[in-house]
Each structure stands twice: as structure tokens, then as C-alpha cells.
Image (cartoon, rainbow, N blue to C red):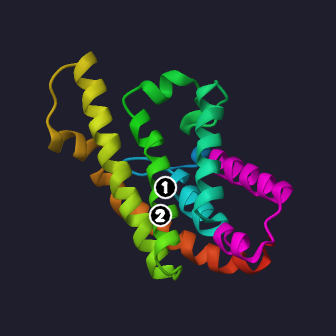
Amino acid sequence: MSDEVAAKAGTGSKPLDLIYISIGAALISVCSWISIPTAVPFTLQTFAIFLVMLLLGGKRGTISVLIYMLLGAVGLPVFSGFKGGIGILLGNTGGYILGFLFIGLIYMLFTKFFEKSYIIKVIALVIGLAVCYAFGTAWFMHVYMQSTGEVGLLAVLGWCVFPFIIPDMIKLALAVVVAKRVEPVIKD
């Protein structure tokens, strides 16, 4: 049951919310360490973001993402490659990590103002991912050009976005399948 449903039903539990949020942040951390070797290696980070949103709802899911980012910012090795520290967030690809917040915020808005069907949830996650890509790409270009020099938009998209679109769509589909299976056992 999502946090929006729990709030309407009046059954939300602060300790239970804290447990779910903590588990969500831990899941994102663990999935960021899992790297799938391909021509362009990718992690299961976005899978975890999608799954946390679908299972915990927009509010608790977004808080889980924020806690994950804060843990990494203070130096815990929760980012891909067992890295941590504010330097990762301020580096070339830090904008993509910060962009995960947009996925959560957009998901929260969509599920608040529209029906909560899986179609709407998936649309919200896809739009959120597109905003994450856009923010991350703008961030990458800004940081990269300050330290290295000029780079074109298509080059950055070729490095940072195009190779990840299909894997991210596969991760989204997998997150939907897992969420539908796990949802019945989550209690609020």
C-alpha cells in the first residue's frame, strides 16, 4: 500500500515509515554496487529507484532517495563502484545522481493528482527519468567544460544517455513486475 493510500486511511505509522524509508535507501545503495558488464557497464541503481517509488509511494520513496544521496555525500561508499563523498555529487556524473530526486518528485506529483494505476505510475517514472537525464546532461556539460573544454551535446548524450535508455526501460519493466509481486506483502 502506498503512502498516499495509508494517509487517506489514517493507518500510516511513523516507525513503520522510518523502517520502509531506511530499507529503500539501503536497497538503492546495494543496487548501485551491482554492475552489469556490457559494452557500457551499468548498475541497478535506477531499478532500485523505480522499485522504491512503486513500493513505497512518492513521499517515502523520495525521502529514501534523499537519504541515499546524503549518505553518499558524507562519504559512505553507497554510490556505484563503492564510492562516496561530496566530490562524486559535484563531479561530472553527479547531476544524474541528483536527478534521481526529480524522478521521485515527479512520481509524487503524478500519483497525487492522477489516478494511481500502473500506467500512470510508469508514465511518471519515464518522465522523471527523462528529466533526470536532462538535468544530469546539463550538469555533466557544465562540469566537463569547466575542467576539460568544449564538448557537444550529442557527444555527451552518446556517452551518458543513449547507452542507458534501453537498459533503463528494461529495469523499469522489471521493477513493475517485482513491485506487483511484492506489494501484497507490504503492510502500512
User: Which quarter of the rendering shows the C terminus?
Assistant: bottom right
Quarter of the N terminus within the rendering = bottom right
- Above or below 181: residue 101: above
Q: Is residue 39 visible?
A: no
Instruction: Please rate how many residues cluster around mark 2, counting C-alpha atoms within 10 Å: few if below 14, some from 14 to 19, many from 20.
Output: few
Residue interval drawn in magenta: 1-30
To which quarter of the image does residue 47 belong?
bottom right
Query: How far apart are the two marked residues, 1 and 2, measured between alpha carbons?
Result: 6 Å
Residue 103 on the magenta span:
no
* Percent position of residue 25, x then y: 67, 48
What residue is shown with label 1? 105
- Secondary structure type for disc 1: helix
> Which amino acid type is shown beneath numbered disc 2?
Leu
Marking on residue 128: none
Type of secondary structure dominating the magenta stretch = helix
Give the SS element for disc 2. Answer: helix
- Locate residue 153, reporting x and y percent: 16, 41
Give the residue displayed 36% in from the left and 29% down from the top: 92
- Check whether the beta carbons of the residues at disc 1 and disc 2 lie within 8 A of each other: yes
The residue at which mark 2 appears reads as 109
**Amino acid tagged 1:** Leu
Front residue of 34 and 2:
2
Query: At 85% across and 55% down in the image, what residue appears?
Result: 15
Whether residue 3 is in magenta: the answer is yes
Residue 185 in the image, given as x and y percentages of width and height: 79, 77
Residue under the point 58% across and 77% down: 177
- Does residue 34 lie above or below 117 as drawn? above
